[in-house]
Image (tube, helix red, strand yellow):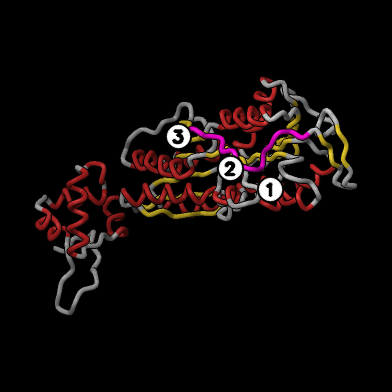
Amino acid sequence: MADPNTSPPITSPGSRPVTIYDVARQAGVAPSTVSRAFSRPGRVNAATAERIRRVARDLGYRTNPLARALSTARTRMIAIVVPDIGNPFFTQIVRGAQTAAGEAGYTVVLADAQESDRLERAALDRTVPAVDGVVLAGSRMSDSAIRMISKQKPVVVLNRAVVDVPCLVTDNARGARDAVAHLGGLGHQQIIYVAGPAASWADGMRWQSLREAAAEHDLQVRRIGPFSPDVPGGLQAAGQLRAQPASAVIAYNDQLAIGLIRGLTAGGLHVPRQVSVVGFDNIVAAELVTPGLTTVAAPLHTQGATATRHLLAMIEGRRGRTGEPAVLPVRLVVRGSTAQRSRKRISPASGTTSVSGSAWHAPMSTSAGSR
């Protein structure tokens, strides 16, 4: 009887499709072992599974995901939902997820929520019935909505903490402390935080951590925004900074920081001689802009791969980690966008120069530790 998990490879006239039994015979294992190697690779010895896959490739055997789904209620597909497919922050996360999924014989379905909780929920309503699990990379939905999805299929959340759902975050607190310590060491006394989306959990954590770190270093910090987490958002923020400047700026992410540099430069301010700028994430563009962007680097590829492997383990029946979020380390990458605070104050409007004890005498409306 023809195996239901096979679909015919391209063959010459008169030849027959390769079945699971052909692979088993050639690999010297039982047909059930071949089946597990493709449906549950974690339950087959790694060397044996590799031998089976090699034999399958040589013979031209192909699994049929739809046929297998009928018999196992699995499609061997997982969904990754991102807030903005155009944001390069998510590129490495998706690639890490694809690497881990591919190693396990899974296919990744990508959905773009366009920074909208409504569109995100609509995409999940369409996608969840067709996949075995979901990775939410920076969800804009409410915690309760995420928990509802997790009751339907296994879910892992990235860059956010949700009670009763497995979560994986980067060390925002460490990143904020390192950025503040770096700027304080360069003599900056006042820092502006350029905020990202109001619905972003990471934005709230970074702002809170910056306030705490600034208080530890006896520095002042205030927040402007929110802004869209992209280059146009940074350009918009630059307009506000020119009116109420400070000698150092930390942006919610690298795209905002890059837009800031462009906007400040276009307005006659020099980065870093007059304004030092720090970003978050260390996307590829961070080292391509001029000056190179000082930023908090997150292990994005590792984050995507780790989340996916945890999700696949849950799909196989293991219990998901639902306590405190798993935390991945970060590191500060210092480039040319930060420098020693200058004692010269240059007005971007007039181009005149004066010497002062502070680089910018703009009032700081919010001190560290206040809301």
Q: In the rendered structure, does residue 75 fall within the stretch colored magenta?
A: no
The residue where tag 1 is placed is 228
Looking at the rendering, the stretch of residues picked out in magenta corresponds to 329-342
Amino acid type at circle 1 is Ser
Q: Which residue is situated farthest in the bottom direction here? A: 13
Query: Would you say 350 lies left or right of 130 here?
Result: right
Question: Of helix, strand and loop, which mostly describes the magenta segment?
Answer: loop
Q: Earlier in the sequence, mark 2 or mark 1?
A: 2
The residue where tag 3 is placed is 166
| Cα–Cα gap, marks 3 and 1 | 27 Å
Q: Earlier in the sequence, mark 3 or mark 2?
A: 2
Query: Would you say 137 lies left or right of 347 here?
Result: left
Q: Quadrant of residue 322?
A: top left
Q: Position of residue 227 (x, y in %)?
A: 71, 45
Q: Quadrant of residue 312?
A: top left
Q: Nearer the viewer, residue 326 or 13?
A: 326
Amino acid type at circle 2 is Met
Q: Position of residue 357 (x, y in %)?
A: 83, 28
Residue shown at 38% from the left, 52% from the top: 77
Residue shown at 47% from the left, 33% from the top: 328
| Cα–Cα gap, marks 2 and 1 | 17 Å
Q: Earlier in the sequence, mark 3 or mark 1?
A: 3
Residue shown at 60% from the left, 47% from the top: 117
Residue 141 disc label: 2
Q: Residues within 10 Å of mark 1 (few under 14, many from 20)?
A: some
| Cα–Cα gap, marks 3 and 2 | 16 Å
